[in-house]
Image (cartoon, rainbow, N blue to C red):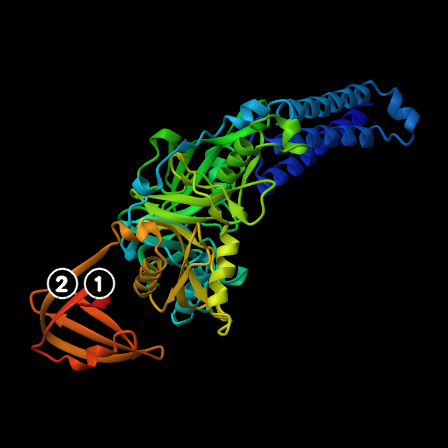
Amino acid sequence: MGSGNKGFKKWKLLLVVLVLAIAGIYYYVALPAINIHNRGFWGFLIGFVVLILLGYAMKKRMHTIYEVKESKVLKAGGILVGALLVFLLIGTILSSSIVNAKKYQSMMVPEDRDFGEDLPQISFDQIPILDRDSAILLGERKMGSMVDMVSQFEVSDLYSQINYNGVPVRVSPLMYASPIKWFTNQSDGIPAYMIIDMANQDTTLVKLDEPIKYSKSEYFNRNIYRHLRFSYPTYMFDQISFEIDEDGTPYWVCPVKEYTIGLFGGQTIGRVVLCNAQTGETIDYAIEDCPQWVDRAFPADLLLELYNYHGMLKNGYINSVLGQKGCLKTTEGYNYIAMDDDVWMYTGITSVNADQSNVGFLLINQRTMETRYYAISGAEEFSAMESAQGQVQHLGYQAAFPLLMNIANEPTYVMALKDEAGLVKMYAMVNVQKYQNVAIGDTVSECQSAYIKMLKDNGISGAEGETGMQEVSGTITKITQSVIEGNSHFYLVLEGEDGIFDLMIPEFVEIVGYDVGDKITLEYVEGDPLHTVTAIK
């Protein structure tokens, strides 16, 4: 009898240890947040109860359905599992937009703004003309030239777009090239990150005095997701991003989900955890206290989802499915604009029943969720991209998703044109309201010059106001000629004037008649340091 009790206790202890071990392994791998708003937590809880019941059934050596039905413990466990499932189902329904359309619709409230006031004409070094694919290509090429690192590390595909000291850049950490490379290098950590200027394509591999020890490419406790989960077991994190502060220190920016409608509905961002990628030190902020240098507290996908609730549900859920009267939604793509020391997500707004046209545009601050709406009708982005590609169809270039800019007081799509290898070869500007008006150029400033001239030639009103053109008269102190990508350029330096004045041949063939010491009057678009000449007076 004593030996039987001893065996029973040993079996029971073994069962408990086995259940706890399985649950522990699952928690370590899946990392569910211990939070009633997390569906994964409910799945973990239900699975844990089922695992206990299975262990009990095995302990009692139950072989038939009858034995299972007669067990009070299994009956109680089955009722508990059923109750959890019903609670989960009811919570899902009560959290849905079907019964909470008005609450969902009011989660984001755009403010009507004036395009000309909010988007003044900005210098080209602030325009992030490259897209993410181009940044990845530049990063891979730079990494390929680093012979001391390329065999051990790769560039992560994160490429977060941020505003760094007033310049739009994309940053991405290195990652271990393989599990074996992790094993041989993890004690020293990751030595660098990549930074790419999205305006001028400058690519820099920043080597760190103190390596990155916490990243997505770690496998155990230094894995950033596991480090966050053990530090904040109840927090539900959204997409985390890699950023650098104003001193170049690498951080993981980790938005914390907040559910405002029922158990699982009305997701927004309530807090932000900043994790120093080098030391693992974390700081927890309420969203309204998030530091100014942080650029991506609200993921772009979440912002698009919130606006689509606003645009689609304004006349109720049923209308959003059936009649769709007055329903609006975002276009398929989006891009980023650096403005006011923040990164603003840009996307177009179109009617659900419209075709190839926008009714307006959105700018959304990714740190504060401030949302600005501009009621400007015109071509949607993909139509503009096709229009630009039509100008270079003989070259086979493809247009990147455009930016919305203010050029000569006209809302204008600005985009890069890339060859088959993904390299940026030219630039295009397309008038939003009259998208058949397209200008192209080898540089952004050259493209702008052609665009403004086209607006004037076509009598478009915006070109009659402030265009960004300047005029200068002076004596030529230096003149030189160069050929860039098959195009001849003359470069002038004028006495007492900063910068270099760029004239492209054959548009200004008369420049060949000028020499050092001659006086000249030029109309130009200011650049840094290259000014693009639009006319010789």
22 above or below 386?
above
How many badges with numbers are in the image?
Answer: 2
Q: Is residue 428 visible?
A: yes
Q: Are marks 1 and 2 in contact (CB under 8 Å)?
A: yes
Q: Earlier in the sequence, mark 1 or mark 2?
A: 2
Tell me the CA gap for discs 1 and 2.
Answer: 8 Å
Residue 395, position as x, y percentages in the image: 48, 74
User: Which quadrant does the C terminus fall into?
Assistant: bottom left
- Reply above or below: 474 against 132: below
User: Which residue type does callout 1 highlight?
Assistant: Tyr
In which quadrant will I find the N terminus? Answer: top right
Say the numbered circle drawn on residue 60: none
In the rendered view, does 507 fall on the left or right side of 389?
left
Nearest the eye: 278 or 452? 452
Identify which amino acid the numbered label 2 is placed on. Answer: Val
Q: Residue at x 35, y 50 (%)?
A: 410
Please tell me in which quadrant of the rendered image residue 510 appears: bottom left
